[in-house]
Image: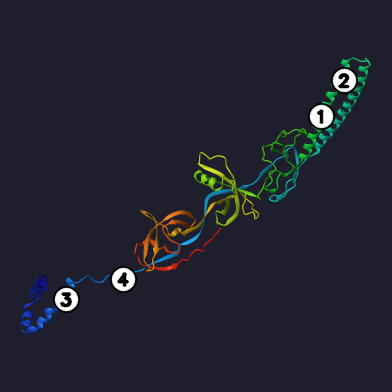
Amino acid sequence: MDTRSSNAFEAISTGVQDAVPERWRRAAARTPSWLWAVALVLLGALVWYVFFTGSPLPPKQKAIPVNVTKVALQDVPVSVTALGAAQAWYSVTVLAQVSGKLLTVNFAEGTDVKAGQVLAQIDPAPYRAALLQAEGALKRDQALLANARLDLARYKQLVAASAVSQQVYDTQAAQVKQDEGTVLLDQGQLDAAKVNLDWTRVTSPITGRVGVRLVDPGNLVSASGSIGSTPATASATSNAPASGANSGSGIVIVNQVEPIAVTFTIPQGQFQRLVEVSNGFRKPMVTKAFSQETGALLGEGALSIADNRVDPSTGTVQLKARFPNADRKLWPGQFVNVELMLQVIPHATTVPVAAVNQGPNGLYLYVVGPDKKVSMRPITVAWTQGDTAAIKDGVRVGETIVTDGQMILKPGSLVRIVHPGTTAKRRTT
């Protein structure tokens, strides 16, 4: 026993003796000395163990429950998303091209119509009368022209025989020219009368779907799109609104929904990348439309048109995609979520976005080792698409990473796997 131990032992012994009552010391005086020696040795051993041996063994480390998955290798699609709106590929407001009384509306609202199908009938009676007048005027003036040509032929012979003056012949030649012009004018009026009569049959200019009719039979319509319910007398060839007509919006609207268009905007920064990827929009770009309510896929089309300018007020460019819409899940005026595919990153190292953590020094993952202890691994993310992150460097395919429960982890923490994930299958395009 060294000096320090002896001093401590003596101090403890002295303190113990002072604390013992007087009657206990008299009783102890009658105790054999060898028994006291054994007690003091045991007491010294206890003091030595408490004060001069190492600290107690540390408690066993408790495992932290986590969810994990494997780092996968797959092709990652790179796309941009935007809010879009469906609109008819062609939308036509059908207007009356001549004035008159609307006799019939020959379509069922909300049905499909073909190009050239008769949609409405305007009273043709005044236009038939105008056509008849034009035909009569043409025949009259054609007869006058024929007579003037015969007179010209006679004057030509008389001039040669010096029976009439050259002035008379020239006057007759001018009369023939004048009658020819009158015949041409009559022919033009006849053609116009035929056109106006044809326009009393209002036809659909495109194949599409009609909406709710905008005017009922019995109303007066005009070529300007106005509608009136007050009877009026108008010239058959006049395009002016009838007296008493009110401002209207046509007869019906026809929308082409097969195909259909979806318009959306993207920031000008993404537009530059889109130009490069699409080779100046010469390469088709896959575009998908999803429901805003359910997220269901409504259709897949191709980007067809990019606006020729950047909107200076928003810094965006408007794009237009064409969708076949054979199942008619897209409807004009419907708002959708648009996903425009830019490119595919082949054979990318991928992890769930939930596994990526943000620290003071950047992004990192928790990697589980064979001993079920985690290590913090700095990473570089190349692209994030949906719930998948493509990793540029930092982890290897097949390593186990923590996807849930990492908030209470630190490097070296022991973990217990609750729900092991499965390695994503490799996908190719």
Q: Amino acid at mark 1?
A: Leu
Circle 3 residues within 10 Å: few <14, some 14–19, many ≥20: few
According to the picture, the residue beneath numbered tag 3 turns out to be 46
Looking at the rendered structure, the secondary structure element under dot 4 is loop
Instruction: Say the numbered circle drawn on residue 172.
Output: 2
Q: Earlier in the sequence, mark 2 or mark 3?
A: 3
Q: Is residue 239 left or right of residue 382?
A: right
According to the picture, the residue beneath numbered tag 4 turns out to be 60
Looking at the rendered structure, the secondary structure element under dot 1 is helix
Q: Position of residue 421 (x, y in %)?
A: 46, 66
**Is the C-beta separation of discs 4 and 2 under 8 Å?**
no
Dividing the picture into quadrants, the one containing residue 161 is: top right
Q: Quadrant of the C terminus?
A: bottom right
Circle 1 residues within 10 Å: few <14, some 14–19, many ≥20: some
Dividing the picture into quadrants, the one containing residue 50 is: bottom left
Residue at the image point whose x is 56% and y is 54% from the top: 290
Looking at the rendered structure, the secondary structure element under dot 2 is helix
Looking at the rendered structure, the secondary structure element under dot 3 is helix
Dividing the picture into quadrants, the one containing residue 371 is: bottom left
